[in-house]
Image (cartoon, helix red, strand yellow):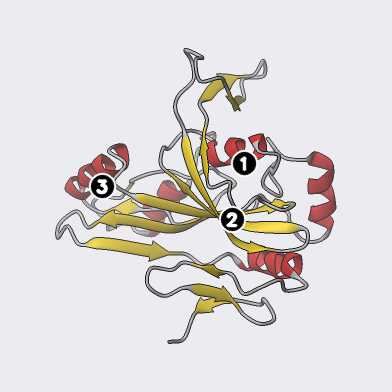
Amino acid sequence: SGVSFGVIEQLRQARPDARFLELVHRLDRETSGILLVAKRRSALLRLQDQFRDRETGKTYLALVPGVWPVNRKVIDTPLHKYLQADGERRVRVVARDDPDGMRSVTLVRVAHQGPEFALLEVTIKTGRTHQIRVHLASQGHAIAGDDKYGDFERNRAWAKQGLRRMFLHAWRLQFNHPASEERIELHAPLPPALQEFADHAARPPVRPDCLRLGRHPVRFGRDHRALHPERS
């Protein structure tokens, strides 16, 4: 939103011979990771149906300060979207009986707990605006680098350490192929800047917690420099 020449416009310009290119879903401007593009209208409609009917699996990686309670696995609190006086949209947690609240469910798993940060696998069961950002912030663990719901003083300090964006990454996407119905699972590695900051934040190593990559877990290496498939 607010971008006149975004990802889909760039793709169309780069591939002028493509008859059809359309985004199946969207990511926040500050979020990196997997973005699904349809090359046929029939595929677009079938995939959008899956997103609407919550048949897809969307898992993100988020880095938050502090120690995340391992037993806090589900956040089920309503969210309300509103506009500020300057026209900027924001989202807040509201009471369950709030008529403007929309049920929002987020699943959280600690992928790696360091001395100062926790790397979380976050799966959304509903697709509300800024859902992950607001839900994590409501638990006292705003995403590192979040310039809307985060800790601004900490963000400035982390920027000096190399984190100049929000640490939220669309890591895994699961859906049924629109033609064959085969279950597809896609993964996107962390961008180099986020990986480098995560490596720095993870020191000293606590334990080799893994990111669950289908049947093949992904672990931090011994020196925390990379995420790589575990050898069998």
SS at circle 3? helix
The outermost residue toward the front is: 71
Q: Nearer the viewer, mark 1 or mark 3?
A: 1
The image position of residue 1, as x and y in percent, is 51, 35
List x then y, in percent, for residue 2: 54, 34
Question: Could you tell whether 31 is left or right of 187 in the image?
Answer: right
Give the residue number, with chain letter if any, for mark 2: 120
Q: Residue furthest left?
A: 180
Query: Hey, what amino acid is under mark 2?
Result: Leu
How busy is the neighbourhood of tag 1: few (under 14 within 10 Å), some, or many (20 plus)?
many
SS type, badge 1: helix
Q: Can you name the residue that lies furthest to the top here?
A: 99
Q: Amino acid at mark 1?
A: Leu
Mark positioned earlier in the residue sequence (1 or 3): 3
Residue at position x 51%, y 20% in the image? 96
Q: Residue at x 40, y 54 (%)?
A: 11
| Disc 3 target residue | 47
In the rendered structure, find residue 136 and report the number of the disc placed on it. Answer: 1
